[in-house]
Amino acid sequence: MWKQVKKIGLVAAAGVMVVPLAGGVSTAKAASLAKNQTFKMMVPTELTSMDNSKTTDLYAATIQNNTGEGLYRLTSKNKAVPALAKSVVKSTNNGLQYTFHLRHSKWSNGTPVTAQDFVYSWQRTVTPKTSSQYAFLFEGIKNAAAIADGKKQPSELGVKAIDDYTLQVTMEKPVPYFDLLMANPTFFPQNKKVVEKYGSEYGTTSAKQVYNGPFKLTKWNGTNLKWTLVKNKDYWDKRKVKLNKIQYQTVKDPSTALNLYQSGDLDDVTLSSEMAKQSANNKDKVIRKMASTFYLEYNQKKIPAFKNKKIRQAISLTINRQKLAKDVLSDGSTAAKGYVPEGLANDPKNGKDFSAEAQGAAEKAAVAYNMKKAKKLWAEGKKEVGIKKLNVELMGDDKDSSKKILEYMQNSMEKLPGLKVTNQNLPFKTRLSRSVDGKFDMVMTAWNGDFGDPITFMDLLTSTNSYNNGKWRNASYDKNVSASKNANAANPDARWQNLLDAENTLMTEQGVAPVYQQNEFHLVNSKVKGIVYHQTGASYDYKTTYIAK
Amino acid sequence: MRKYILKRVLYMLLTLFLIATITFFLMKLLPGTPYQNQDKMSASQIHMMNVQYGLNKPVWQQYLIYIFGMVHGNLGISFQFSSQPVSYLIATRIGPSLQLGIQAMIVGSILGILLGAIAAIRKNTWADTLATLLAILGMSIPNFVFAVLLQYILGFKLKLFPIALWDNFSSSILPTIALAMMPLAETARFMRTEMIDVLNSDYIMLARAKGLTQAGVVWHHALRNSLIPVITLAGPLAVNLMTGSMVVENIFSIPGIGEQFVKSITTNDYPTIMGVTMVYSLMLVVVILIVDILYGIIDPRIRLSGSEVNA
């Protein structure tokens, strides 16, 4: 009996713990709430558009996520929870079909949100004329790629409104991360009447669109530096929304941000290098891990020596990543542990972080700083290739931080006898063009993931991928990535293992050398509670955020 | 005079046309595309986008299309602010920049003239030394350093003015002071040299000999004659303020146009690059014209050929 009670107690306790996670809800007791529920947030860049068919940046996505509502929302652990969909649905027909039942809800102009609003939004995004830079996220949904290429009509997209509150999605192939996409603002519904009323001006000011999320956007004229989100009285789940107002302010100068934070004018600021260094011991420090890996690509097509595994390994081992992250960057960035960044994705079986799970002895050794081993591998590699010395250029961006990083890496690499490295700092777009054209020897490049699944990174380095600028090729890597997308697409556990194996191959081979994971350094007022943060899609969810007394 | 101005306006239009042409072709040499998500789009996706925006056409065709649009008042759509017309972007962002520029110009030149005049009249005294010192500081310390110091001391520590943000007139005071330092220093330096020259000239001696008071000499004779070179400075200083306000705008989080200009270049936002360049150029040629007209008003000798000289 006692045992049973204990068991029930445990289950209940677990339930209490799971509820906030599952719902992304931290239920704040009314008594603990401060009277003034206003949150003052800083962003480093303007809001450029609110048309979710056109934006691609995290800042716009965050505003859209808080003023709009899609089928799902995500918990801080990237788990989908129902939003406009009444439940999280499982695919049928071998992962090729999803049928969503929508709850009754309203736009801020009073009209109901229906399944047609999803159909309209999705069709509009993939239409070439809309010029969406994120249309590729729809690939996998039936005919999406063909429509984006202009080969099929938007009406042929695999999405259908069976009735006002039933939405059916048909896939070309199973997409294992489909749930995550359904929580991404790019897949949010649009009110056809409103879009057509404003035409090309849709989403260019706060008045020229409608909202169905926890908040409504106000005071945004399209180009100004501040705007305000106010609680949406028409939101279906408004009971859970605690904040009355979120005041946004664009601040581009980090020292201004720090002054405004310390004087209480802002509750959450992002600081960069110098200011971050100064605030390293601030009790309000919060590091937001980002889905962003900076890595070194070796151009195997141009420099044959880079085809040698030992040469690549040797160069990678000369870089003291811990020191680079801590002393050179000092903005909260961390040493890369692998190609897929920490905190991006969780194992479907046990919830463990992909990056942590992939950390076998071999992976750890691959990015560890070990000059002795580096020199040994270097000597062996040179012998195998038949060279005495190697002169290469190291290309990177021309920002201050990039210059410092390149200098540090140049210094480290040149400790290998016979290796001469010349740095080349170029503007971002120039660097990008040269990378794509293969006009480089080594390049420090970065990738930002689009959704919380390792494939958003792993896909890049397959033999045939156009982003694989270094042209590293590995049959086992290709096989595993392909299996994760095809043969095992509907089998989450096997698929996960494929991705872990691929990461393992990449790291031991050092096809590319991951250097650091870029993170954001924040100061956040400790009275602000319940911010849900995501690495990809929309960074923040303020639905259940509140200001404590 | 009217004929002169008409001729100058025609030259102005020609200048603007040349600037538009040169900028357009130079800009097209920038590598990359104007798409934010360029690094994630495949070559075929980029091609589709180029077709949508007409960027796949030969450059000369794009040029003709742009010039035709510009003549008809259409500056195109921004890429950074998707769907936002460039004319709207400039219209909403230029106000604060202009306000700051004009305030800084007024404060800087008036104080500069005063300081320069005092230094010249009280040559080789402590007042002169102090004025010269101020001028050297103003010239050698970049305005963003002033901005940071003003923000920290007067804004953050003493709380006399807002730290940053653009709410009301009081938020424009600190950036105005920061921006005014350069014109102040330049004007003071020029004014001092010029005034000393003038004060030593024959007609001033004559005026003194006729028994005019020191104040009368300075006010009626010296000041006006010393102003001519100072006015020459106004043109370049105004341009400097227009293009140089970017960092100060950033420090005080002011929704100005300065930063947009730089950002449009780094992001290949072609219509914005063109639009802002043309607005800047227009302001520059207008300022130069005003300066030339002011010459004539201050010094009748400079009324140029083509106008009737009232001797």
Image (tube, helix red, strand yellow):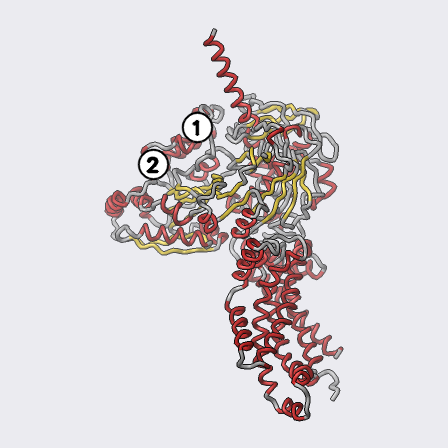
Q: Amino acid at mark 2?
A: Lys
Q: Is residue A375 above or below residue B223?
A: above
Q: Residue at x 43, y 52 (%)?
A: A396
Is residue A447 among the parts visible in the rendering? no
In the rendered image, which residue does mark 1 sit on?
Answer: A352
Location of residue B203 in the rendering, given as x and y in whole percent from the top left corner: 65, 90
Q: Amino acid at mark 1?
A: Lys
Q: Residues within 10 Å of mark 1 (few under 14, many from 20)?
A: some
| Comes first in the chain, label 2 or label 1 | 1
Q: Residues within 10 Å of mark 2 (few under 14, many from 20)?
A: some
Dividing the image into 4 quarters, which one contains the N terminus of chain B? bottom right
Q: Is residue A424 above or below residue A214?
A: below
In the rendered image, which residue does mark 2 sit on?
Answer: A364
The subunit letter for the residue under badge 1 reads: A
Q: Is residue B305 above or below residue A307?
A: below
Dividing the image into 4 quarters, which one contains the C terminus of chain B? bottom right
* Horizontal relation, residue B162 to residue A432: left or right: right
Q: CA distance from mark 2 to mark 1?
A: 18 Å
Q: Residue at x 26, y 48 (%)?
A: A382
Location of residue B257 in the rendering, given as x and y in whole percent from the top left corner: 62, 57
Q: Is residue A115 above or below residue A206?
A: above
Q: Residue at x 69, y 80 (%)?
A: B298
